[in-house]
Amino acid sequence: MAEVGTFALWITLLLSLYAIPAFLIGRSGDARLVESAKNAVLAAATMVTVAAGILLQRLIVTDFSLAYVANHTSTDLPLAYRISAFWAGQEGSLLLWLWLMAIMAAVAVRTRRSDVQNLVPYVGAILSAVMAFFALLTTFVTKPFVLLATVPEQGASLNPLLQNPGMIIHPTTLFIGYVGLAVPFAYAMATLWQRRSDDAWLQAARPWTLGAWLFLSVGIIYGAQWAYVELGWGGYWAWDPVENASLMPWLIATAFFHSAIMQEKRGIMKGWCVGLITGAFWLTLFGTYITRSGVLKSVHAFSDTYLGVYFLTAMLLTLAGAIYLMVSRRKLLQPEVQIESIVSKEASFLAGNLVFTAAACAILFGTMYPLISEVLQGASVSVGPPFFNKVFVPFGLAAVLLAGLAPLLAWRKSSTENMRRHLLLPAVGTLLIAALLAAFGVRNPGALIASATAAFTACSVIFEIARGAGVHAKTGGTSYVAAFGRLFSRNRRRYGAYLVHLSVVMLIVGIVGSSVYSVSSEVALNRGESAQLGEYTITFSGLKEMRDGDTKAIVYTDLAVSKNGRPVGTVRPEKMFTAYSEEPTSEVSILGSLAEDFYVALSGWNGPDQGMFKLIINPLVAWLWLGEYLLVVGTLVAVWPRKRPIASVQPQKSQETTVASGV
Amino acid sequence: MAMAVNLVLMVFALALVGYPLLRYKEQPEPVQAAKLQQVADSVEAALAEAELDQALGKVNAEDYRTMQKRLGSGKQKK
């Protein structure tokens, strides 16, 4: 079946290459050619599905005649990890990228929106070009269906670090996010290419952008969760180049859909919209480049240098094409009105764009610093977490502050009266919370500032929701609860976004608690001895060993844990040895609650009677993972399509009536 | 076996790509409710936000009308 997989990839490449000129020639009126190109994209998606299906099936049955299967699976690997081995290696992950791209392109070119039908040929051509690039890589460079001359009896198995449920979800969600950003990028370029200045593309691209952003967010947080439970160092974010590579497009995509609101409502920030979505897509290519080029060292990197030149070329072409279109059509990107006041919604969104862009640029600079220093000074120097924390924290706090401030501001200009009316309650709420936190012992200035900022945003969002519900209750003559439901159903985009703002507050709470108030210690215990950290005491009863088949051995211990002298459970930290890896992997054990995690890792031992442990108390870290759920809910609320018969769409005349009545 | 499957794949791809070139007849595009619905929905969502902004005192009547006109003209255009 390997021949079929290779053949399917070949056809995918040919179909993608056919679709590009077919779309471009057909756009000037030959509907048959455009339809044929759309079908070519659909056929390409089918072909990649066949190729992916074959690779997946070969992984599941551990067909070691395929080099990729032999390098990433073994017969004793659980089924879930034989499936996740699909994206564990270079060849499979690029095939996954191509697969997702082909499916998304096939869906995107079949859009039924009437207002962007004449953009479709351009969108199709751009997406086909991206598809052709990945088809070229998988067909000629990475080749996932290479057969081995001698079939080994056993495979090399999957890297033990990747044998974690988080690694099933994290890469796929990130990939969906990365690939999804190609569609709004294609829409932006198509609009410029066709010399259109309207914002239909923003509305057509909106589900794609929000969907991609949601998957990117989930992917980033799942990655943090994986690092937390699997790497054994007690943290969840290390500013690793590949972590940064996923954060940068997330920041820029966040700025993009905020700018889109401005273009849609006020006809401003058109240049920002196109520039930001180009930046977000470009950064996804950049992320793939640094993961696969070997230019930067990372725990995630595939470390193959030969792919770098292909990605570099693609990045340069993308950038050159986008810049050409933006410069040559710059008149189309002129704002329809000017920002009148610094105290306005428009100005706060602009400030948000600057903050997000500056944060992404600072991270890009820090990530690329080893290369920059090598070129300038002849020696590669890395900047570590202190640099990133110092640079990112102020930007992060500014963004959170703006997330609370922007909803309160009026369009065009906020009067003093308007500011007083909208700011008073959130400001009082913030002061109260800050005073309470200080009274309960939060004295660290950084923590207090961050908490107060988060509190302001939370108060602002909660009061805004309450005010909105109040307006609906008053105008609709309904109960407050019914008005609350009506508010969310009529304004899903806005109030979904407010839920996302609240989720960011939860993330901030988790980050502040776990970074500022985390305490840790390393202890060596003999059998029967106890150690204490904070209110927790652990008692060591000796190490045990457990064998799992012929290839896996686990060294573990059950530690009795008490809090303030009261037993609260046991933890079982482990070290796992496999025949496939020289280094053992840590399986940490966590006793968690909303208030704090008690985190225990087995760091070493000296015979069965002496164990060394890393103990950490991480306050509020669960808020990070809970914030993720709220983020998902908020985004789904914002992106969920409205269910309403077309007849209920108000005609223009009746809208004017509504204005006149002052609703 | 592999050759037979490859042949099927190739015929499938060629048929899909070639069919519109040989048989496709451009139909006058009917005004489909579903197509319009998507456009109307995104405009309506933005209008609902503008309306709420006015009620909350975050946009004055003149700007609100401009916003409506902008969004409404987008809708009419479709």
Image (cartoon, coloured by chain):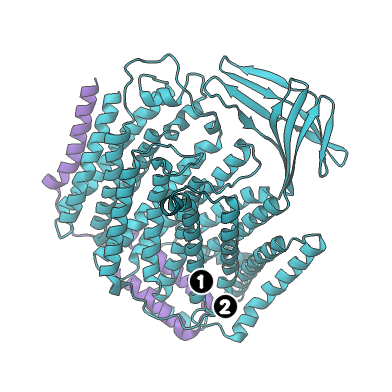
Between A256 and A605, the one lying in front of the other is A605
Host chain of mark 1: A
| Res A398 seen here | yes
Q: Is residue A426 left or right of residue A155?
A: right
Residue positioned 81% across, 44% down in the render? A534
The amino acid at mark 2 is Leu
Task: Please state which amino acid type lies under the numbered disc 1.
Answer: Ala
> Where's residue A34, x and y in %?
19, 52
Q: Share a chain, discs 1 and 2? A: no
Query: Dot 1 corresponds to which residue?
Result: A351
Chain B appears what colour?
purple
- Res A522 → quadrant: top right
Which chain does cyan denote in the image? A
Mark 2 Cα-neighbour bin, 10 Å: few <14, some 14–19, many ≥20: many
State the residue lying farthest toward the front.
A378
Distance from disc 1 to disc 2, alpha carbons, whole Å, reads 23 Å
- Residue A531: x and y in percent read 82, 35
**Relative depth, front residue between A315 and A51:** A315
- The secondary element bearing badge 2 is classed as loop
The answer to whether A383 appears left or right of A93 in the picture is right
In the picture of the structure, the residue carrying the numbered disc 2 is B56
Quarter holding residue A288: top left
